[in-house]
Each structure stands twice: as structure tokens, then as C-alpha cells.
Image (tube, rainbow, N blue to C red):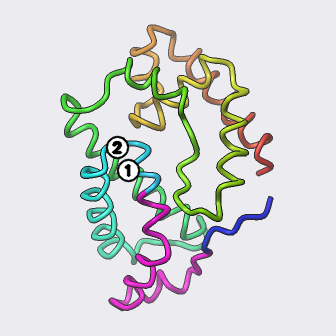
Amino acid sequence: MTTNAPHIHAGIMTKIASGDKDALAQLYRTLSPRLFGIILRMVRRRDWAEEILHDTFIQIWQSATYYDEQRSEPQIWLSHIARNRAIDYLRKHENRCCSVDDITEAEEGFQAPLAEEDSHLEARRLQHCLENLPPEQRQSIALAYYRGLSQTEIALSLSQPEGTVKSWIRRALTHLRECVGL
């Protein structure tokens, strides 16, 4: 599958790790729309997403020395930082955020977190793949993605055995990988 998403080279992470502020600014210009899209999809509030994006880039600046290009592509590593910051924020503000009912309603509009216009086709393909999941798998993925819930927490939320939820998520991820061609 081809993508027009910006490619970040591992070299920029090396520059950021050595304290190069221009490299961080370049990374921000290139990747902030995509990271903002990921965060916004998770927290569903623009003001929170802006705050989390800011925190994400502070963490990137502080953690760049830990990046290992042998373990993952820069975009994947950076996306994980953004998701983890969003999860931390949601957990910290849990009483002010979405309920499981909100997630159930939101999963109907569940779409790929790609903010760039060039990735529209990729997002549509992922949306199609999500729509073809059985409802329990789609809901489990939505709870994990929107709320950052662990499999144990999803099992409790859905009143299902943890093993069942693990199977749903594993099957859903397998289907999504095959469907989008990864």
C-alpha cells in the first residue's frame, strides 16, 4: 500500500537528541498535524488535544535520546508517545471525559486518525475495514483506542471474560492488518 504521509528519517531524531532545536521545529511542522489527529480522535476535545500535543513535543524533546531506529520507524515511536500522553491525560481527567456509552456511540463514526488530506484514501480504507469487523471486536478496538483501556479494563467495562476480549482484539487486529495490506 502506498502512502503520501510524510516520511521522517531516523537522522532527525539523532539531531533532536543532540539538542538541535531546528530539527525539532522541522519535526513539528512535518508531523504535528498527524499527531494532533491521533490525539484529537482519542480525547475528542480540541482544547485538550492542543495541550496534549504540546506535552507530546516536550516529551519528544526530552526523550529523543531513547529512540532506537532498530526497534521502530520514527513515526511509529512518535505516535506511541502521542497516544501514551493522550491516555495519561484521559486517565488523569477520567471523570471529565467520555463514558463507555459515549464510546459505543462514537464507534459508529470511528475513523482513522489521519489528519493529512493526502491520507484520505488510506483513512477510507481503514474505515471500511473497521466497518467489516463484528460489533464486539469493533467496540473492543474503540475502547482500547479512544480510552486507552487495557484488555482487563475492557473486559470489566463490557462484563466479558478477559480471555474473550483478548481474542476479540487479536482477531480484530489480524483482520485490520490483512484488510489494509500491512
Residue 121, picture quadrant: bottom right
Q: Position of residue 34 (x, y in %)?
A: 50, 62
96 displayed left or right of 73 = left
Residue at x 53%, y 24% (from the top left corner): 140
Contact check, label 1 and label 2, Cβ < 8 Å:
yes
What amino acid type should be assigned to the residue bearing mark 2?
A: Ile
**Residue that numbered label 2 is attached to:** 87
Q: Quadrant of the N terminus?
A: bottom right
Q: Is residue 36 above or below residue 16?
A: above
Reply above or below: 139 against 158. Answer: below
Say whether residue 2 is left or right of residue 100.
right
Q: Secondary structure at mark 2?
A: helix
Asked which quadrant contains residue 100, the reply is: top left
- Type of amino acid at the residue the image marks with label 1: Asn
State the SS at label 1. helix
The span from disc 1 to disc 2 (Cα, nearest Å) is 5 Å
Identify the residue under disc 1: 84
Q: Main secondary structure of the magenta part?
A: helix
Q: Which mark is residue 131?
A: none
Which x, y percent locates residue 166? 58, 24
Between residue 42 and residue 19, name the one nearer to us: 42
The residue range painted magenta reads 7-36
Residue at 59 percent of width and 81 percent of height: 9
| In magenta stretch: residue 140 | no
**Closer to us: 181 or 107:** 107
Residue ID at (70%, 53%): 122
